[in-house]
Amino acid sequence: MAKIQLNGRNFKIVQKLTIKQLLSKHKLNENRIAIELNGSILPKSKFKKTFLKNKDKVEIVHFIGGG
């Protein structure tokens, strides 16, 4: 079990959870968001390959259309 911070809130996650799996778990569409992992923007191409580790800080920003 690992502990991460997601949008300022503490969460416990299972080991070997990828960013893509985290998004699926929270029912988020990866095409409408940006991910900041430990202070750096994570390219969408790395969502499947990036595993979360203990004490990681994840910020998820949603894009909202409007006019």
Image (cartoon, grey):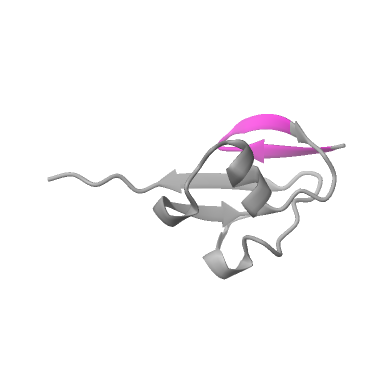
Position in image of residue 61 (x %, y %): 44, 46
Q: Is residue 30 above or below residue 11?
A: below
Counting from the top left corner in percent of width and height, residue 14 is at 82, 39
Task: Inspect the magenta stretch and tell me whether residue 35 lies in it.
Answer: no
Residue at x 67%, y 38% (from the top left corner): 5
Q: Which residues are magenta?
A: 2-11
The question of residue 10 being in magenta is answered with yes
Number of marks present in the image shown: 0
- Determine whether 61 is above or below 42 in the image: above
Residue at x 81% of width, y 45% of height: 54
User: Which residue shows up at 54% across the image and 38% down it?
Assistant: 27
- Left or right: 36 in relation to 3: left
Q: Spot the residue most to the left.
A: 67
From the image, which quarter does the C terminus lie in?
A: top left
32 or 58, which is in the foreground?
Answer: 32
User: Magenta segment, principal secondary structure?
Assistant: strand
Query: Which residue occupies the foreground of this view, 11 or 14?
Result: 14
Horizontal side, residue 56 vs residue 45: left or right = right
Is residue 43 shown to the viewer in this render? no
Tell which of 65 and 40 is nearer to you: 65
